[in-house]
Amino acid sequence: MDRQKFIEQSTLLSIGGLLLPSAFVTSCRKMTLFEEVNYDGKVLIIGAGAAGLYAGYILKSKGINFQIIEAATNYGGRLGKLTGFANFPIDLGAQWLHGKNSVVGDLITKSNTQITLDDGLEKYWFNNHLVDKVPQNTKIFEGDNLPDISYKDYALLKGLGNEYKYIIENIAGDQGAAASRLSVYGNNKDEENWSSGAEDFKFQETYFDFIDKQIAIHVKDKIQLNTVVKQIDYSQSTIKVTDSNNKIYTADKVIITVPITILKSGDIEFIPALPTEKITAFSKIGMGAGMKVFLKFSNKFFDQNIIGGAICAAYADDSIGKAQNDNVLLAFVMGQQAEYLTALGSDAAITTALIQELDLMYNGQASASFIASHVQNWTTNPFVKGAYSYSTVGMGDARNVATQPINKQLYFAGEAMNINGHHQTVHGAVETGYREVINILNDLSK
């Protein structure tokens, strides 16, 4: 049986002990990862998030020389862990496993990692009351022939009045966007490509712990932290990468895994300048403000999920799936709501605004039992600058253009570069790290 037929007929493929769905493998340009690799060049990975860590892991399994440089003081990207705040570890960043049918899901099964289905009941804050359901159907954003307009405009078009405003913000916020910026057409097309499953799961420890123990542990010795890349010169066959201290790193191939916000803002200078179509593609991919605020209380007065707040459209009981059960409520704040809270200027002011809203919902019980808060504002993190990517109105094929390698030298990975519907997720980021290693190997064979 030849290699391509083997790929097409296998349900799962094993690479270096990690399992990969064949559907994802066959979506790559060509398959060379199973062949022997004789390459004495060096690959430099910029960014030690999920994509960069996994790319490093695969490169290590093939015996290819690589280094990972990371701007922050820790690896993990938009993963993070907080201890000591509650009697269970807190996920500061990515928190939910969105479906098991993925590279990450397979590795969870293989490693017997403890996860719990998160199917908590929802309450809606509607017309100043908590209710079990709302009068009109809000599941209007799926189907054929949907327009390329915003969720906000489409909701109004379908007759959902102002009283549904923050419920729609919650729906868009789940995609990391404000309702006025997320495309109905674009997001629906993304959902059509989604293949990892519909159920959401939480880790008994944290998502960071899982990535740390299963992937990062194998490449820690190759990670250099506190290294902010300012320039990438790919004008010659040897690429020169300069950091903020003017130290130069050389490589033959570079995998760039930084958030799309960093590419859009021009924090990294490219020599020569990137093609205009690439820069335009970056600009069309959305990534808005996002923060997580953890509120600890002496009593569990709140419901498992609260949808539709004017300050925060999505609250969730953070103890679900944990071995311990301190009373911690997560305020999951996205888009314009995150911009508003960020503009308040301090963690204390952010906390006060949220407690006041919860007091309104629960007749003063929030302030009466409040103990402490922790604010994780990804918007103000200089190496992230937001939540995760989404499809904007008029985005078109921007993701496909953004992902294309340049000159067999520069390769682009990270959740925003996932073109299989799995952007916004850790497993989507992992898939792109794998994809770009394949692209490098393909280019080496030509």
Image (spheres, rainbow, N blue to C red):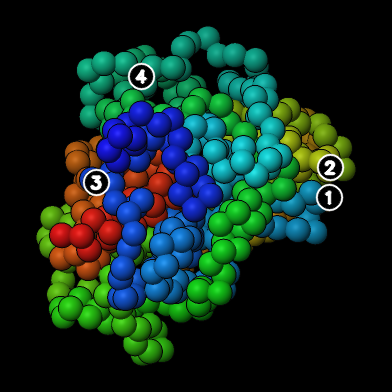
Write the residue at 42% across / 77% down.
228
For the N terminus, the quadrant is top left
Rounded to the nearest angstrom, the CA distance separating label 3 from label 1 is 47 Å
**SS at badge 2:** loop
Q: Do the residues labelled 2 and 1 touch (CB within 8 Å)?
A: yes
CA neighbours of label 2 inside 10 A, class few (<14), some (14 to 19), many (20+) = few
Identify the mark at residue 30; answer none if there is no mark: 3
Location of residue 212 in the rendering, given as x and y in whole percent from the top left corner: 61, 58
CA neighbours of label 1 inside 10 A, class few (<14), some (14 to 19), many (20+) = some
**SS at badge 4:** loop
Location of residue 396 in the rendering, given as x and y in whole percent from the top left corner: 19, 39
Rounded to the nearest angstrom, the CA distance separating label 4 from label 1 is 40 Å
Against 45, residue 308 (above or below) is: above
Read off the residue under disc 4: 142
Q: Are marks 4 and 2 in contact (CB under 8 Å)?
A: no
Q: Please indicate, yes or no, whether residue 421 appears anywhere in the rendered image.
A: no
Read off the residue under disc 2: 324
What amino acid type should be assigned to the residue bearing mark 2?
Gln
Q: In this view, does 266 lie to the left or right of 352?
A: left
- Point out the residue furthest to the right here: 298
Q: Which of 20 and 262 is in front in this view?
A: 20
Q: In which quarter of the image is residue 413?
A: bottom left
What amino acid type should be assigned to the residue bearing mark 3?
Lys
Rounded to the nearest angstrom, the CA distance separating label 4 from label 3 is 33 Å
First-in-chain label (3 vs 1): 3
Q: Which of 393 and 196 is in front in this view?
A: 196
**SS at badge 1:** loop
CA neighbours of label 3 inside 10 A, class few (<14), some (14 to 19), many (20+) = some
